[in-house]
Amino acid sequence: MVQYFTEKGLKKIKEELKELKTVEMKRITRLIAEAAAFGDLKENSGYHEARNMKSFLLGRIEQLEGAVNEAIIVEKKEDGKIQVGSEIVILFAGKKEAYHIVAPGEADILKNKLSYESPLGQVLMNQQAGNEFDYEIKNKKIKVKILKVK
């Protein structure tokens, strides 16, 4: 499945992937070896925990490799429409909010990075400054006005 990224976002994912493959994998392999040295693996909780950590790590590496292999870098068009990479300011239920529209792998709502695949992100895509719409959350309609697209 194609995944759209900003150039900065893809770079961040590649850096995480490199870190996991080089540093974290060595660390966990060392933990497994140390735990195995204590003997009886059947009742060795340290060994089992380290193996679980390795399984989780391998899953994350697979996820990141898939994202990198399926990545398409979005070149931001300067047409005034909201797209991946846009920085926007909206009036959301009467409150000003600023967001950066990003790929799902880059999304972090605590840093105001909103995925284009999120429910609100999907509605915002291709809209322009000045547009207004009702956004429904839990059967409650909220007025949204796009103030700025950069």
Image (cartoon, grey):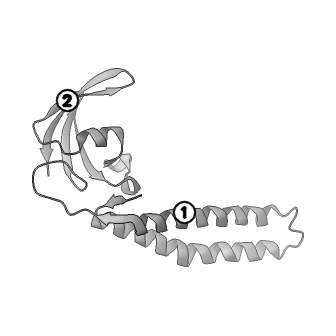
Vertically, is 129 above or below 103?
Answer: above
- Residue that numbered label 2 is attached to: 133
Which tag, 2 or 1, sits closer to the chain's start? 1
- The front one of 18 and 117 is 117
- The front one of 57 and 71 is 71
Vertically, is 40 above or below 119?
Answer: below
Residue 27: x and y, percent? 63, 75
User: Which residue is farthest right?
Assistant: 40
Residue 32: x and y, percent? 73, 72
Tell me the quarter of the picture where residue 53 sits: bottom right
Tell me the quarter of the picture where residue 72 sits: bottom left
- Which residue lies at the image location 38% right of the left edge and 52% below the top edge? 104
- Which residue lies at the image location 41% right of the left edge and 71% below the top edge? 14
> For numbered disc 1, what is the local secondary structure?
helix
User: Which residue is farthest front?
Assistant: 1
Vertically, is 120 above or below 87?
Answer: above
Distance Cα–Cα, label 2 vs label 1: 38 Å
Residue 140: x and y, percent? 33, 21
66 relative to 53 in the view: left or right: left
- The front one of 5 and 22 is 5
- Residue that numbered label 1 is attached to: 60
Vertically, is 88 above or below 130?
Answer: below
- Mark 2, other Cα within 10 Å: few <14 / some 14–19 / many ≥20: few
> For numbered disc 2, what is the local secondary structure?
strand
Amino acid type of the residue tagged 1 in the rendering? Arg
Tell me the quarter of the picture where residue 91 sits: top left
- Which residue lies at the image location 78% right of the left edge and 71% below the top edge? 35
- Mark 1, other Cα within 10 Å: few <14 / some 14–19 / many ≥20: some
Amino acid type of the residue tagged 2 in the rendering? Phe
Please give the count of numbered marks on the rendered protein: 2
